[in-house]
Image (cartoon, helix red, strand yellow):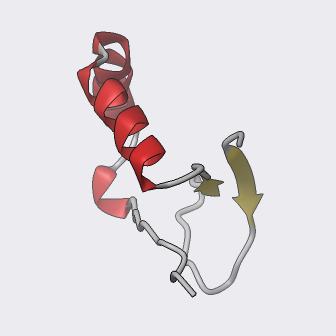
Amino acid sequence: MPTIWITVTSPAVPLQKDEQLIMVTDSYLNKEAFLRVSELADRDPTIAALFDELMTIIDISRVTRAEFELAQV
């Protein structure tokens, strides 16, 4: 499934005047697919270079990340 980027306006998250709140949702077929993609991304030098460039632009201390799994029923 594609990555979904959403720009959000919420009074629950205080923003500085030059910030935007962006929520990103990724979806994978299963945990194995997630691990496979994550491993490839972690080893990709282009992604590493983009991450390094991103760190010069944003304040990483203001980034929140979470991972969730669906419960097996």
Q: Position of residue 15 (x, y in %)?
A: 55, 68
57 lies left or right of 56: right
15 lies left or right of 9: left
Q: Is residue 21 visible?
A: no
Residue at figure coordinates x 54%, y 76% from the top left: 70
Name the quarter where the C terminus is drawn. Answer: bottom right
Pick whichever, 67 or 70, lies toward us.
70
**Which residue occupies the extreme front position in the image?**
73
25 lies left or right of 63: right
Pick whichever, 9 or 73, lies toward us.
73
Residue at figure coordinates x 57%, y 54% from the top left: 19
Residue at figure coordinates x 28%, y 22% from the top left: 48
| For residue 25, above or below residue 16 | above
| For residue 73, above or below residue 33 | below
Residue at figure coordinates x 24%, y 21% from the top left: 43
Q: Position of residue 45 (x, y in %)?
A: 28, 12
Q: Position of residue 55 (x, y in %)?
A: 31, 35
Splitting the image into 4 quarters, where does residue 54 fall?
top left
Name the quarter where the N terminus is drawn. Answer: top right
Q: Is residue 23 visible?
A: yes
Pick whichever, 68 or 16, lies toward us.
68
Q: Position of residue 49 (x, y in %)?
A: 31, 16
Pick whichever, 13 or 49, lies toward us.
49
| For residue 30, above or below residue 14 | above
